[in-house]
Image: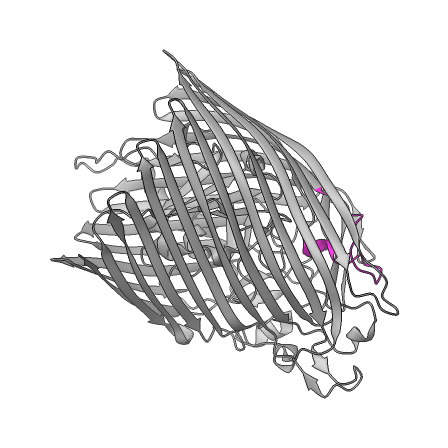
Amino acid sequence: MKTYRPTTIALLLTPAALLAGNASAAEATAELPTVTVTGSRMAVHSFDQPYSIDLLDQRKIGEGQLKVNASEALAGLPGIVALNRQNYAQDLQISSRGFGARSAFGVRGVRLIADGIPATNPDGQGQAATLNLDTAERIEVLRGPFSSIYGNHAGGVIQLFSRDGAGDPRMHIGATGGSWGTQKVDLGAEGSHGSLGYVFDSSHFETNGYRRHSAATRDQSFAKLTLQTDADSRLRLVAGALRQRDTQDPLGLTWTTYQRDTRAVESVATTFNTRKSIDHVQGGFAYERRFGAQQIDLSAYSGTRSVVQYQSIPSGVQANPRHAGGVVDFARQFYGAGIRWSLTQTGSSSELKLTAGAEYDASKDDRRGYQNFVGPSAAPTVLGIKGTLRRNEKDNVHNFDQYLQAVLTTENWAWAAGLRHSSVRFDVDDRYIVSGNGDDSGRIDYRRSTPTLGLTYHLTPTINLYLSAASGFETPTLNELSYSGNGGNFNFNLKPARSRQIETGLKYQTDDGARFNLALFRIRTADELVVLDSIGGRTSYQNAASTLRQGIEIGLERKLGAYWKTRASFARLRAIYDAAFVSKGSQIDAGRRIPGVPATTAYGELAWMPGNGLSVAAEAIYRSRIDVEDSNGAAPAPGFALVNLRLAAEQTSGDWRISEMLRVDNLFDRKYIGSVIVADSNGRFYEPGSGIGWFAGLQAQYEF
């Protein structure tokens, strides 16, 4: 495999180097300042805030994209690593400054929110697949110390906001197709009638998958109603659903298999027909009312999620009476509510914003486990089928958090402070008590207060300097608590990981949309959760390490002349264990790199937009090597550089608007590892990225 030297980074950022040049001689078009709510919970200019936050608008989310995976939109952000596993059974692997890189499935360490409804459970495990990109108006991504104001597992925050229905009624239908049997059909309607706005959308996606045994289908639907009840109040109702049936799981590969065939699967995947089915439905409301300088926000949500997953655990391993089996089957109910009060007081040369609130979130799982075979364990008659019951329990998790934030802005300074108190409870009621398997019921509570403090200095009208600091914490997830490592279930001795973060940076922004952001940060974490053992299909965890993360992030964006635009990002992260500890019976020396975390990531994009709805762009992505386990002894996933091309066009004729897209990924057909499964006990660490692939789409919209 070809390797890439650090100089590759410079090549990827070559378009961004042009940012130092002059803007077009043509008249500059003034742009409105970027307004965000993530981090402050009130509408503020992101340029003035003492933290790293990026906004992805509708163009960046959808232009020339399939709008299937959040990794499509997140690729260009510094500090965010969004790895597409090429495995729809396990969702994306998203990390922020190294938080969340260890997750074996789903998203942990990064808080996910969609239209105010958490896509992260109270235990900290989330699902990016529930984010509906077809209806997204913007995505706000917060990194660094101020993420802790969102409580448990907020090493970063990704918040999606869908469009409000507005304007004349219109309908659209779109179709996309491409490599590996990829197909997507999308149908929707939106608009407004009087004070009522509406957005409806439904899509069907299917693929055979780049790798063998990785086929998937996904049906997603979304509805949103917005009612302006009077001049001072607004009500929003949202609902969404996700359905994936028998999504094939190709698992990871050993290094030897990967070298031989990047599209391969290990034999256990087909022997046990590893797969997962997901049904997810949720809905909620948000009501806001202004009282002069004050505002009250009320919200509530509820939903259900069911998962059935067939794993590749050998039948002989399940002979242990304490083993939970090779089929995971759970039905979850989740719900929550929040209240927030805010006040804005403006003086002759200052402004004070206060926010206070409380949030309650809960999930209740009816969790069962079954053998993945029928017949005797020594000589099963059928594999990959639901067999005898091996686990039966009720798992309840809930959190109750309170927070207070204040922002004081003067002519040259802005102060921001926050305090959040979090209480998280895990309650397990074991109902599978048989000979050889005792009662594993129990309860554990985690409580912590996390303060944040930030300062911004307005050096010039276009340059701000800032400094921020905070403490944060991560409780174990329900999955990480599930096994104790001594042959038993539930490790109620695990402690939360506790972090202290500090960040300083510079922000440059001009009226014509040019932006430059620089951030330097340092994060120390005590009681980091690491793998204690991984055997028999079960991974147990321990508090055994302290870690150090320090790095630099750069983001750039600017117009080049009348028709060209470029953006780029660069991040360098040193993420190490800074104290020795013992994992799986072996000592891990201080200085070893935290697995799953690339040291360097870079992105460069150059777009040509001559007008008339046409956009052509080239994307370049670089990622350095990734270690796959704590000792750093196994072969790492090598670094790589990829080039993608995209084209988007749009035409209007009367009441019709037609848009097309064409996309080519991995233009030079590079062989690379897209993501890794950290500390896999079978050495199946590697999940290959896809080869060259093309995708084309057409959408038609009619306005009534």
Residue in the foreground of this view, choosing between 319 and 606: 319
Q: Is residue 483 magenta?
A: yes
Image-quadrant location for residue 478: bottom right
In the rendered structure, the answer to whether residue 595 lies left or right of residue 660 reads right
- Residue at the spot 83% in from the left edge and 61% down from the top edge: 488
- Residue at the spot 85% in from the left edge and 66% down from the top edge: 437
The residue most toward the right is 435
Q: Quadrant of the C terminus?
A: bottom left
Indicate whether 567 appears above or below 671: above
Q: Is residue 4 magenta?
A: no
In the rendered structure, the answer to whether residue 489 lies left or right of residue 464 reads right
> Bounds of the magenta span?
477-496
Q: Position of residue 210 (x, y in %)?
A: 47, 73
Q: Position of residue 404 (x, y in %)?
A: 56, 27
Residue in the foreground of this view, choosing between 693 and 399: 399
Q: Position of residue 68 (x, y in %)?
A: 42, 61
Indicate whether 666 appears above or below 381: above
